[in-house]
Image (spheres, helix red, strand yellow):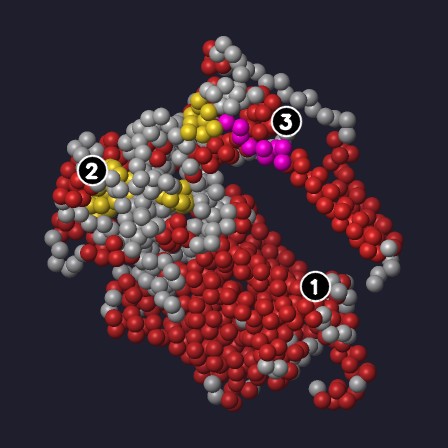
Amino acid sequence: MMYNSRNIIIGLIIFVGIFTFPFVLGAGKANEAPKLSLDTPKINELIKKEPIETVEFMRNNHMQLLSDWKVAVVRDGNRVYVSQKDGQEYDMSLQNTCLDCHSNKEQFCDACHTYAEVEPNCWDCHVAPEVIR
Amino acid sequence: MDINRRKFLKAGGVLALGLSIAPAKSVLAGVKGKYAPGPNALTAKNWAMVVDMNKLEKDVEACTMACHKEHNVPNIDNKKEEVKWIWTDKYGHLFHDNKHDFMNKEMEHRHFLALCNQCENPVCVRVCPTKATFKNKEGIIMMDYHRCIGCRYCMAGCPYGARSFNFKDPRPYIEEINPNYPTRTKGVVEKCNFCSERLAKGLLPACVEASTNGGLVFGDLDDPNSEVRKVLDTQFTVQRKPSLGTKPKVFYIL
Amino acid sequence: MLEKALIKENNRIFWYWILSLVVLVGVGFNSYLHQLDQGLTVTGLSRDISWGLYIGQFTFFVGVAASAVMLVLPYYLHNVKEFGRITVVGEFLAVSAVIMCMLFIIVDMGMPMRVLNMFLYPTFNSPMFWDATVLTGYLLLNIFIGWNVLEAESKGVNPPKWVKTLIIISIPWAVSIHTVTAFLYAGLPGRHYWLTALIAPKFLASAFATGPALLILICFLLKKFAGFDAGKKAIQKLALIITYAMSISIFMVAVEFFTAFFSQVPGHMVTLQYLFVGAHGYSQFVAIMWIFVILAVLALGLLIPRKTRENDKTLIIACIFVFVSMFIEKGLTFVIGGLSENPFGEITPYIPGIHEVLISIGIWALGIMIASLFYKMVVSVKRESDFANASFNKQEMRDC
């Protein structure tokens, strides 16, 4: 057993220091959440500007929805999504359906992802609009 | 005292676990809507193909081009790292168990079309440790690129050389990206999918569509009245390496 | 107990040794970052040779890991007391080797960040799923066993009873890791060199030669640098095990030739031809294959006669030959050879890339480093318990 409490205390201080460093550094410096623009040609054509499910649901669950879509399309061979909100049908495709209306990926995807500091790897394979342009 | 403390800690642990799962549960609530197959989808119990080289002759180039363009297959000019879904190779290679020393040289060097055999009894599916490659309900051997870990066991398993690995980022090697289909990323294995994405929209595979002279016949192997079965009933056809028990579903008229 | 590896007994040479290993690990890690960034294109792997240096060495070190059973089994089941002093050396060798195996698998993967998919989507028909499972289990078993046995010894008590149960479990478990690893290869249609039921027994035989050979070398190193003596009797028992295992394993390599060349089935012959004499104009492995043959024969020549087996100097040479020859056969040419003839009947050559080699060296260095730290701990525990025994019981001291 070791009884060198001095070293332990010094060690603990350093540990706590290192682990709280990012919080201390960022204190009081919260960025403002991005405000997203819906100004795309396809969305402007719509009479009712609503996403495929409620805004609330999409905001919280889009990642799970996309993952479920992948399973449905690739593994189960179901390509059509029937919205629970209004029964409308959509071809399940990130590239061809989501980004068709939301053609402003910089706003629709990147703005929040940058803000939240998440880096989804969707666009390693799926073709982003800017790649085609 | 001691037991009480232990009980307290246990209860606390369960509580903490519950609290940590609760938010996850609401996030993973999943999708509310329903799924359905496409309204125009071509469906079959067991898709299969017959390659009739006599009729195909001139369309070979068009077939491979159509496929590779459709699926964003990169054109990597390096035999070690090339990616191919459909390609041509000489008889002596594709059927190398069936060649002999006195074979007609024209035949031995004649180029045949090759693609994933979509085996009835696929080795790749048997060896894959994550079910990233699997047989779908229509008999097509699919790739789930989101799940593939890039272990390449399927490449060691496939006796037909039908699988390609992305040794590097494929994007710089795609001349013109088809915006309607994804590319792949470095680190995953890819191969022909019998155009399952086209079948879902009621279209025939890109190669079949490009073979204007009927050199590629596509249909349901389990339907005795399908075109594929009619050809198999009336003509002499062979498979690649049938002795391995994989039961290929791509048949050849030599 | 961990402090014994880290703090006690400042030994300058030891820490220089660790430092140089750390440098090699760093070099390997740097290469790995490069591979992560560029993809496996930095290796010599190809469409045809889709597994190479990494998977070959993975296979080899599964054998090294499994070989701990050659100490544990005689000691715990047959009461071979001589091994009592070194079972823990074998167990920590197993731990280091399994860690190396896992690293070789991870660096071989195209999508290493998805490695947990193997357990998120468990696929019972895939030998690779089972391999990952049994290797993880074997790692945990050996960590628990080695640690508890050593801790008990450092406290001067007997290990807890449940450890004995784990030890008994670890015996068939060791056999299972190498059998399942053999099944990765031995069930693939169209890969004729691998398609033989002999792979699993051949793997086990070569493992039981290579692992103990490495153990003997480690024991001599520990004696020279750390003053830890495994005991002449233990070394000699191991040497005998190596002699039998090496003979059986060379026999199993040899009988493949009969099946291939008497049957004259081209698919069965081509890889042996390619490896030993060259085929289709390619002869990349011929020289190295003959080095394997010569070293294996010399090793047997030194191991079988009692005189050279019992002489420390010749035994060390024999052990080096066993290790190097089996590394060539199993670690280099077995995997690459099996893939050399592609599905179109052509031979594809394979030269590992520079980063591939550096990453491999890094993994070796890490494995050696882990083993070194374990052994430092083992040696200080043994020294203390020897000292305690000596002061309590001088009689026992004289027996040693």
Mark 1 and mark 2 in contact (Cβ < 8 Å)?
no
Q: Which residue is mark 1?
A: C15
Q: Is residue C271 above or below residue A34?
A: below
- Quickly name the residue at label 2: B225
Residue holding disc 3: A115
Residue C169: quadrant of the picture: bottom right
Q: Residues within 10 Å of mark 3 (few under 14, many from 20)?
A: few
Say which amino acid is labelled 1: Trp
- The amino acid type found where label 2 is placed reads Asn
Output the chain of dot 1.
C
- Asked if one can make out residue C148 in the rendered structure from this viewpoint, the answer is yes
The x and y percentages for residue C94 are 59, 66
Real-space CA distance between mark 2 and mark 1, rounded to the nearest whole angstrom: 77 Å
Q: For this view, does B225 lie left or right of residue B31?
A: left
Q: Which numbered mark, 3 or 2, is in the foreground of this view?
A: 2
Q: Main secondary structure of the magenta part?
A: loop
Q: Residue at x 27, y 71 (%)?
A: C261
Q: Which residues are magenta?
A: B25-33
- Viewer-proximal residue, B208 or C297? B208
Q: Can you give x and y, in whole percent of width and height, for residue C138 in the image? A: 58, 63
Identity of the residue drawn at 38% across and 50% down? B124
Instruction: Report, in whole angstroms, how far the alpha carbon at label 3 lies from the one at label 2.
Output: 58 Å
What percent of the width, then of the height, locates residue B53?
17, 42
Left or right: C167 in relation to B75: right
Instruction: Give the quadrant of the C terminus of chain C.
Output: bottom right
